[in-house]
Image (cartoon, rainbow, N blue to C red):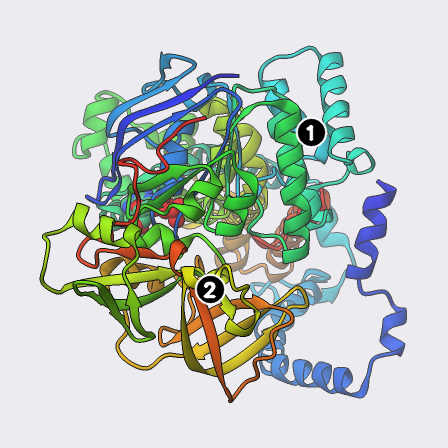
Amino acid sequence: MADIVLDKVSKKYPDGTVAVHDVDLEIADGEFIILVGPSGCGKSTTLNMIAGLEDISSGELRIGGERVNDRAPKDRDIAMVFQSYALYPNMTVRENMAFPLRLAKMDRKVVDEKVGEAARVLELTDYLDRRPANLSGGQRQRVAMGRAIVRSPKAFLMDEPLSNLDAKLRVQMRTQVSRLQKQLGTTTVYVTHDQTEAMTLGDRVVVMRGGYIQQVGDPQTLYDQPRNLFVAGFIGSPAMNFLPAEAEESLLRTPLGDLPLTDRLRASLARTGPAGGARQLIVGVRPEHFEDAALVEDSQRPKGFEFTAPVDLVESMGSDKYVYFTVEGQRASAADLEDLAADAGGADLPPQDSLVTRLSAESRVRGGADAKVWMNLDKLHLFDPSDGRNITLTEDKPGAHAD
Amino acid sequence: MSVQEKVRIPARRSPRTKAVLSEGKRQERRLGWLLCAPAAIVMVAVTAYPIIYSVWLSLQRYDLKFPDQKEFVGLANYATVLSNGYWWSAFGVTALITVISVTAELVLGMGLALIMHKTVVGRGLVRTSALIPYGIVTVVAAFSWRYAWTPGTGYLANLVTPDGAPLTERAGALAIIVLAEIWKTTPFMALLLMAGLALVPDDLLKAASMDGASWWQRFTKVMLPVMKPAVLVALLFRTLDAFRVFDNIYVLTAGANETSSVSMIAYNNLMKGLNLGIGSTMSVLIFLTVAIIAFIFVKLFGTAAPGSDDGTRR
Ligand SMILES: Nc1ncnc2c1ncn2[C@@H]1O[C@H](COP(=O)(O)OP(=O)(O)O)[C@@H](O)[C@H]1O
Ligand SMILES: [Mg+2]
C-alpha cells in the first residue's frame, strides 16, 4: 500500500495533443479516489501514466514517496482493471488469476492458495476451470478484479471497469467494488464518466475537463459547492438548472421574474465585481430547491421567491415528483455549458428552455396548467458567464480540502 | 471440462435441429445454396474434373510415345513410382526445402510483421517496400537470383563464392533455392501474420505488462496464443505452397544434381517424357501429400480462419 502523488504531471502525445495539463493530485494511502469527466478529458491518459503504460511528458509521479517516472509498469507493483477486462482468452479463470503470481515466480502452492482465496471472495470458485469466453459479463468483470487483488499490489487502477455491464449489474458490482476496497484498504484510482458512479463510490472525486482538473473534493462538497458551471452541471442528476440573469442594484432579473437580492448574494456580488451598473450572470438552482408553493411552511416562505409558470410535464417517482416547466426568454450561455451539452452522456442536462424541479409527492400540480412554485434563494448559485466561476462560494479554495 | 461441453452444445448444429427448421429457415437455406451454386459449378468444372481425370490416367499405362500400349493397369504405376529412388530423392528434397523455408519464413515474417505493426511513421512506405519481393513474378525473380549467382558475372557469386559455382553442386544449389523461396515469400507470411497481430487487443498486452510480463513473456504467453489461428493459417498456406515448389528450381538448376522437387519430376515425366500414366501418378501423389498436410493442420492443430476461434478450443 502506498500514497500516490502527481506533481505537475502533463502528457503530450507524439501528434501534439496535450491530453493532460499540469495535474497536481495527492492520493492518500488507502484512499478511494475517482477521476470523472466527459469522454476525452484525459482520465485514461492520467491513469495510464500512473500505471506506466504511457510516458510522463513532464512533472513527477511518486508512489510511496519514490519517484517512479522511469519505471516500467511491472516494477511499479500496481494492478489494473480494464474496461474490456483484458482477460487472456487462452487461459482458464484459474490461469488468468494466477498469471501475475506465476510471472513473479511464486511457489505453486502459494499461488493455488491465493487464487483460491480470491476466487472465494469474488464467488468464482465454481468457474475456475472455465475459459473467459464461457463466462457472463459480470463473471468476467470479477475475474479481472480477481487478477488484480491476488497480488496484493500497492494500488489498484481501474479504467471504467463497470461500463460494459448492464444497468442492474452495474449497481450490484458498484457496491461490491466499494466493499472490496474498504476490506482491502488498498489505494485505488477509479476512472469513470458516470457521475452517479463517482458520487457513490469515492472518498474523493476529481472532476476533469479538457485535460485540466476542475475541482477535487468529497462528493457532498462537489454537489453543494461546485467551483464552476462545469462541475455544477456535471455533478447531480437531474442536472442543475441554469438561467440567464442580470444583476441590478437590489434585484436580479431572470426569466422567472425579478428575484430580490439577499444579503448573501449582495455580498458575493460586491466581493467579485465592480459596484453599480448591470452585470450579466448565470443563476444555478438544483431541482430539489424548488417546492410547490402550496406546500411550503410559513416559516420557510420568506427565504424564497415565488413564481408562476406553465407545467410542461409531471413525472411521478413515488417518493417525489419531477415537474418540468416551460420558461420563456433567453437561454443561459457560457463555454462550460456548451461543453456539458456536447457530452450528453455524462450529465443528464434538461432541454435548455425547460426548468426541472423536484417537488413533494403531495403536490397537486398537473401538466398543461399553471403552477405556483417556490424557490429557495439560500441555495441559489451565481456564476460568472465569462469564466464559469461560481461567485457565491465564500471560501477561496472551495472543495480543495483533503481528508 | 464437462461444464465447458455443456456450454458449447447449443452452439453446435445437432442433426435434430434440422427436423424442426421453420419454413422461413428452410427458404433461407435454399437461397444460400442457390447463391453458392454458380461458384460451386465453376469449382467443379475447373478443379474436380482435372483431378478425377488425373486419377483415371494414373491407373493406366499411357505413354504418348507408345500410344498402342495403353492399358488399364490398376495401381501398378503407384508401385513403380513409390519404389523408385528418384521419386524419394525428390520427395526428400521437397520436404527439406519446405521445412527449412517455411520455418525461416515464419521467424522472419513474424519479425517483419512486428516491425510493420509497430511502425507509426511512414507505415505505408515500410509496408510497401516490404511487399516488393512478393509483387515480382517468381520466374523473373528466379532469373535475377540465377544471374546473381552465376560465377564471373553475378554480384553475389563474386562476393560470397569467388572461386566456386554454387549452383552446380547439390548443397549450394539447394541453399540458393531455399534462399530464393524465403526472399520471395516472407512478405506474404508477414502480411498474414500482421492480420493475426491485429487480432491481439492492445488492452491484453497492457494487462500483461501490468501483471509483470517482460516483452518476451508478452510475446510468447499472450500474443502467440491469441494469434495462433492466424499463425496456423499462414503456416498451412505456406507449407502447401512450398511443397509444390517449381519455378525457382526450374530456373535455377532445372533439377540438375538431384535438386528436383516432386513437382519438377512430375513435370519432366509428363511434359518431357510424355508418360501420362506415370506423370499423373506423381501428380496424384503430390495432391494426396498436400491433402494430408492440410488435414493434419485442420484436424490436429485446429486451424481455422483467423478470428473464427472463440477460445473454447485448445
Ligand atoms: N495515443 C494517442 N495519441 C494522440 N492523442 C491521444 C492518444 N490517446 C488519447 N489521445 C487524446 O487525448 C485525449 C484524452 O484521451 P483519454 O485520456 O483517453 O480520455 P478519457 O479516458 O477521459 O476519455 C483525447 O482528446 C484523445 O483524443
Ligand atoms: Mg478512457
Kind of residue at badge 1 = Glu
Q: Position of residue B239 (x, y in %)?
A: 54, 44
Determine whether, in the image, residue B52 is placed left or right of residue A63.
right
Quarter holding residue A117: top right
Separation (CA) of disc 2 from disc 1: 65 Å
How packed is label 2: few (under 14 Cα within 10 Å), some, or many (20 or more)?
some
Using the rendered image of the protein, determine whether residue A194 is visible from the camera's viewpoint: yes
As drawn, the label of residue A95 is 1
Residue ID at (65%, 60%): B277
Q: Position of residue B188 (x, y in %)?
A: 41, 48
Kind of residue at badge 2 = Arg
Q: Is residue B120 above or below residue B67?
A: above
Look at the numbered disc 2 and give the secondary structure of its residue: helix
The residue labelled by disc 2 is A301
Host chain of mark 2: A
Quarter holding residue A278: bottom left
Q: Position of residue B41 (x, y in %)?
A: 62, 80
Q: Is residue A166 above or below residue B53?
A: above
| Camera-side residue of A38 and A221 | A221
Residue ID at (38%, 27%): B172
> Are circles 2 and 1 on residues that touch, CB within 8 Å?
no
Residue ID at (79%, 53%): B8
How packed is label 1: few (under 14 Cα within 10 Å), some, or many (20 or more)?
many
Q: Is residue B104 above or below residue A151?
A: below
